[in-house]
């Protein structure tokens, strides 16, 4: 496309810009001043908002164009230009040293499909700026309290203690329960390393057990087999959005006087028998990392119904400082606090969590529809008794000897997919903690997580299907 079709003058009217955008079909116009300098941009969304707010088509855009915008320079490396794109920015102006427009770059969605992206189209920016302007930008502020309350209420639990990330949430929970040297904590073989690392931090001994073949979650039978007089806790991980069998796990814990610490990092909103995960453990832990269902960038939370544990975690989270006597430390604590800025984003995310879960569910259903005739592909189970999984990442199993072929085919075509977690029992630093884990080793070699973002559509899923079929036939398609 000729560059001229994307350009209008800063003295142009709203109607002029509408015409420009209509003709270039790119949804954007680059605005130059009389000297040819790029001074702003206008999108079709900007135009709609002006018209909704009562401006006329003959009004000038000069006072309304975006004067702060993302652009690239002519000497920028291609990788640096690509890094400027996000879900809002699809076209970048390219300028010379005098800010004169020399070219533009557009993002071709067929070149790259992200595995995961945060979805922030609600009050995230509004609340973030409110927190920023309040000057309460560190670990004190109204949004922290609000986020803790809103999220714990959503999970059906009384108290929430926001933390700096999901790993510190797990460590905080274990420490608050007094777990340490001489104790054992049972964990599943398929999980992110944070689960076992938090146990190791306390000085306790992790005990790695196998998973269920149908759910990929920790096996209740293997939990029972692993219990010893030193066992103090179980950490069931609701892997890839699938709830564990919390009925059997709770029974085992009660019979053996064990604590349950739920790891819900990947399962916000999942349910067992119509009760949300996070409401079964004495303490339950969540992550709000950027690829999670809702996010604060980095961040986590411990939730509990126990008032005493709630107070204890708050003290431990804040350097062990007395809540009644400033700078007087009652115990050795940690700096595991979340900032008010992060909590502001989290508050807005909680407002929309049901909406986010709904579009994720609909996306997974599209995958199921497109993949229904792929006999050698198994999607994550979604009809297990008493369990209501959520769609964190769309997850599939394929033949072990074809998995890497498929992964290579996807990546060669710019599609971000990832293999399942490597079993803890296969990593040298954790092997000494592991019991026999045949199922987890089998499942991990078959598993793939596929792109799960709001930008996915049937056409893109069909493309992924074609590449999976190519991988299954060992006919890798390297077209971009």
Image (cartoon, rainbow, N blue to C red):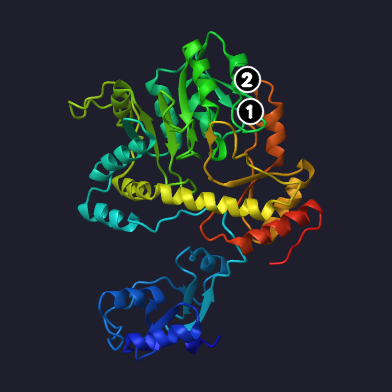
Q: Mark 1: give few (<14), some (14-19) or many (20+) Cα within 10 Å.
A: many
Q: Residue at x 72, y 59 (%)?
A: 466
On the image, the x and y values in percent for residue 296 come to 39, 47
114 displayed left or right of 412: left
| Element type at mark 1 | loop
Occupied quadrant, residue 448: top right
Q: Determine whether 448 is above or below 27 in the image.
A: above
Q: Residue at x 51, y 17 (%)?
A: 251
Q: Determine whether 178 is above or below 449 in the image.
A: above
* Residue sitting nearer the eye, 309 or 384: 384
Q: Determine whether 289 is above or below 132 in the image.
A: above
On the image, the x and y values in percent for residue 227 come to 57, 13
Q: Are marks 1 and 2 in contact (CB under 8 Å)?
A: yes
State the quadrant of the C terminus.
Answer: bottom right
Q: Single out the residue that lies furthest toward the left.
A: 325
Occupied quadrant, residue 152: top left
Q: Residue at x 47, y 48 (%)?
A: 357
On the image, the x and y values in percent for residue 370 come to 66, 56
Q: Which residue is mark 2?
A: 222
335 displayed left or right of 423: left
Q: Would you say residue 237 is visible in this rendering?
A: yes
* Residue sitting nearer the eye, 49 or 40: 49
**Mark pair 1, 2: CA separation:** 8 Å
Q: Would you say residue 295 is visible in this rendering?
A: no
State the quadrant of the N terminus.
Answer: bottom right
Q: Which label number is shown at residue 356?
A: none
185 displayed left or right of 343: right
| Element type at mark 2 | helix
Q: Which residue is mark 1?
A: 211
* Residue sitting nearer the eye, 451 or 433: 451
């Amino acid at each position: 496309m000729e560059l001229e079709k994307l350009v209008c003058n800063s003295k142009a009217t709203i109607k002029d810009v509408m015409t420009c955008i209509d003709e270039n079909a790119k949804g954007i116009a680059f605005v130059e001043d009389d000297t040819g300098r790029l001074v702003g941009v206008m999108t079709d969304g900007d135009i709609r908002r002006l018209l909704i707010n009562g401006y006329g088509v003959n009004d000038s855009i000069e006072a309304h164009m975006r004067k702060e915008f993302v652009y690239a320079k002519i000497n920028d490396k291609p990788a640096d230009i690509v890094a400027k794109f996000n879900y809002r920015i699809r076209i970048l102006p390219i300028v010379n040293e005098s800010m004169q427009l020399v070219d533009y770059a557009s993002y071709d969605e067929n070149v790259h499909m992200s595995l995961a992206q945060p979805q922030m189209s609600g009050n995230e920016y509004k609340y973030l700026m409110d927190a920023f302007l309040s000057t309460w930008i560190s670990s004190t502020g109204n949004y922290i309290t609000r986020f803790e309350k809103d999220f714990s209420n959503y999970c059906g639990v009384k108290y929430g203690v926001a933390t700096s990330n999901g790993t510190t949430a797990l460590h905080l929970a274990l420490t608050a329960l007094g777990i340490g040297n001489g104790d054992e904590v049972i964990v599943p073989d398929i999980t992110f390393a944070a689960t076992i690392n938090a146990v190791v931090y306390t000085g306790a001994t992790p005990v790695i057990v196998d998973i269920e073949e149908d759910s990929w979650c920790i096996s209740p039978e293997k939990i029972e087999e692993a219990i010893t007089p030193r066992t103090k806790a179980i950490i069931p991980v609701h892997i890839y959005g699938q709830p564990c069998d919390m009925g059997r796990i709770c029974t085992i814990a009660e019979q053996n006087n064990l604590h349950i610490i739920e790891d819900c990092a990947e399962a916000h909103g999942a349910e067992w028998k119509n009760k949300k995960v996070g409401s079964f453990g004495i303490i339950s832990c969540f992550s709000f990392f950027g690829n999670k269902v809702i996010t604060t960038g980095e961040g986590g939370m411990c939730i509990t119904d126990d008032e005493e544990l709630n107070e204890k975690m708050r003290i431990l989270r804040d350097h062990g400082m007395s809540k009644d006597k400033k700078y007087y430390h009652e115990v050795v604590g940690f700096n595991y606090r979340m900032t008010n800025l992060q909590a502001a984003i989290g508050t807005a995310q909680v407002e929309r969590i049901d909406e986010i879960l709904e579009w994720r569910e609909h996306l997974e259903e599209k995958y199921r529809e497109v993949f229904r005739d792929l006999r050698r592909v198994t999607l994550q189970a979604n009809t297990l008794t008493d369990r209501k999984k959520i769609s964190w990442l769309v997850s599939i199993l394929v033949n072990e000897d074809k998995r890497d072929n498929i992964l290579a085919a996807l990546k060669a075509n710019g599609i971000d997919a990832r293999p399942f977690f490597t079993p803890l029992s296969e990593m040298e630093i954790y092997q000494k903690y592991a019991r026999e884990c045949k199922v987890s080793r089998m499942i991990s070699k078959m598993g793939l997580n596929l792109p799960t973002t709001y930008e996915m559509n049937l056409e893109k899923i069909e493309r992924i299907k074609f590449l999976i079929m190519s991988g299954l036939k060992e006919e890798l398609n390297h077209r971009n």
